[in-house]
Image: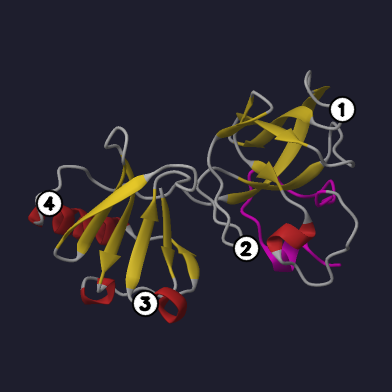
Amino acid sequence: MIFAYNKEQVGDVLMVILQDTKPIARQVERKGKVARVYAENDGRTLAWNIFEVSSLMELTGNGQVFPSEKDIEILNQELAKEGFEESLEATPSPVFVVGQIKEMESHPDSDHLNICQVAIGGDQTVQIVAGAPNAAVGLKTIVALPGAMMPSGSLIFPGKLRGVDSYGMMCAPRELALPNAPKKRGIIELNDSAVVGEAFDPAKHWQN
């Protein structure tokens, strides 16, 4: 689940996004402060909108937000009060971490994509399909994991690229809106001293 809040542009609405809804015909049902966005063909829930959310909790920031456990409990109480049986879960964080490419092979159906096995800390490895020209075994970079919202507003969910599962994205400096980001293609290249699994900190990991 991705939680997003932008009072200036959208209003006092907390958006809770479960998956990419762009290609899906959808409907909305609203009860009180809660609106459920669901797929027209099978009824599955795609997203929630919580209106007048500042009356329920204090939210700061512009873009992706990470409600506390207490906040999630309050939101679920609001859903239950309006008769919804589903519940919300907190987004595991951090969603941007230092990763290291451990294995890489060419995509069987592409002349520029690679299938990478990327360590993200805690003995965890995710598969990411990437087309970065500088991707290489051993490279440390910044990984956007499923559940991340990019500065552009695009969302990271598990998906497929040319039929191959991909669970995140290795990030270029421009994709993270970093200052003085080079215009050339390629993912961020971190020093060997970067700690795999560490949360991304621009002040620490970007000194260009």
The color scheme shown is: secondary structure
Q: Is mark 4 on a helix, strand or loop?
A: helix
Q: What element carries label 2?
A: loop
Q: Is residue 198 magenta?
A: yes
Closer mark to the observer between disc 4 and disc 3: 3
> Which label was assigned to residue 80?
4
Residues at marks 1 and 4 touching, judged by CB atoms closer than 8 Å: no
Q: Does the magenta stretch include residue 107?
A: no
Front in this rendered view, residue 116 or 100: 116
The mark nearer the N terminus, 4 or 3, is 3
Among the 4 quarters of the image, the one containing residue 60: bottom left
Residues at marks 4 and 3 touching, judged by CB atoms closer than 8 Å: no
Residue extent of the magenta highlight? 187-208
Answer with left or right where residue 7 lies relative to residue 70: right
Q: What residue type is labelled 4?
A: Ala
> Which label was assigned to residue 152?
2
Q: What residue type is labelled 1?
A: Asp
Residue picked out by circle 1: 111
The mark nearer the N terminus, 1 or 4, is 4
> Which label was assigned to residue 11?
3
